[in-house]
Amino acid sequence: MALLFATTVAPASAHAQKRERDRITREELLASTYSELDLYGAIRSLRPHFLRQPQGARTFGGSVVRLVSVYVNGIRQTGVEALRTLNARDVDEITYLEPTRSENEYGPRANGGAIVVKLNRGGRDLHE
């Protein structure tokens, strides 16, 4: 019976770890020493894999560069440099979407993965 319990818990635990690996919460940001940084610096310190560019896809004409897309409150930004204009304290949640998932959710322009930022109500939006 203990063996059955271990096999049923392991997949859920692995899924939870994966989910936390691809998410940064407001609580985590505020509890870290990185809450005083811009959002780019905080992400680079807490989850550097969010910022890594995926490998380019091969085509007949050569390789295609796939860039990580950034969405703040549902609005596509010009790139990861936009994260430098946001304060980590203004964020509710940051989620990283792997390339396949981001392309399914946001279309072919997001084929390199996506960083999805939800600002708290006090945080300013980039397009204001």
Image (cartoon, rainbow, N blue to C red):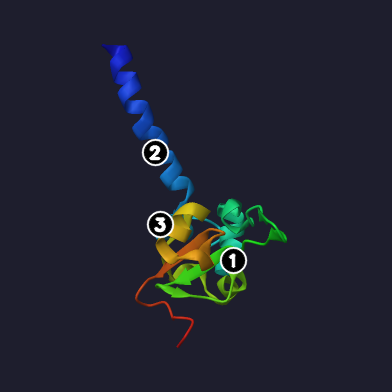
Q: Earlier in the sequence, mark 1 or mark 3?
A: 3
**Secondary structure beneath label 1:** helix
Residue located 54% across and 66% down the image: 69
Within the image, what quadrant is residue 118 found in? bottom left
| 85 and 33: which is toward the camera | 85
Asked if residue 45 is positioned above or below residue 71 in the image, the reply reads above
CA gap, disc 1 and disc 2 = 26 Å
Whole-percent x, y for residue 17 in the image: 43, 39
CA gap, disc 1 and disc 3 = 17 Å
Q: Earlier in the sequence, mark 1 or mark 2?
A: 2
Disc assigned to residue 11: none
For the C terminus, give its image quadrant: bottom left
Q: Are marks 2 and 3 in contact (CB under 8 Å)?
A: no
Residue named by callout 3: 27
Q: Amino acid at mark 1?
A: Tyr
Residue named by callout 2: 15
Q: Amino acid at mark 2?
A: His
**Secondary structure beneath label 3:** helix
Q: Are marks 1 and 3 in contact (CB under 8 Å)?
A: no
| 73 and 57: which is toward the camera | 57
Asked if residue 75 is positioned above or below residue 48 in the image, the reply reads below
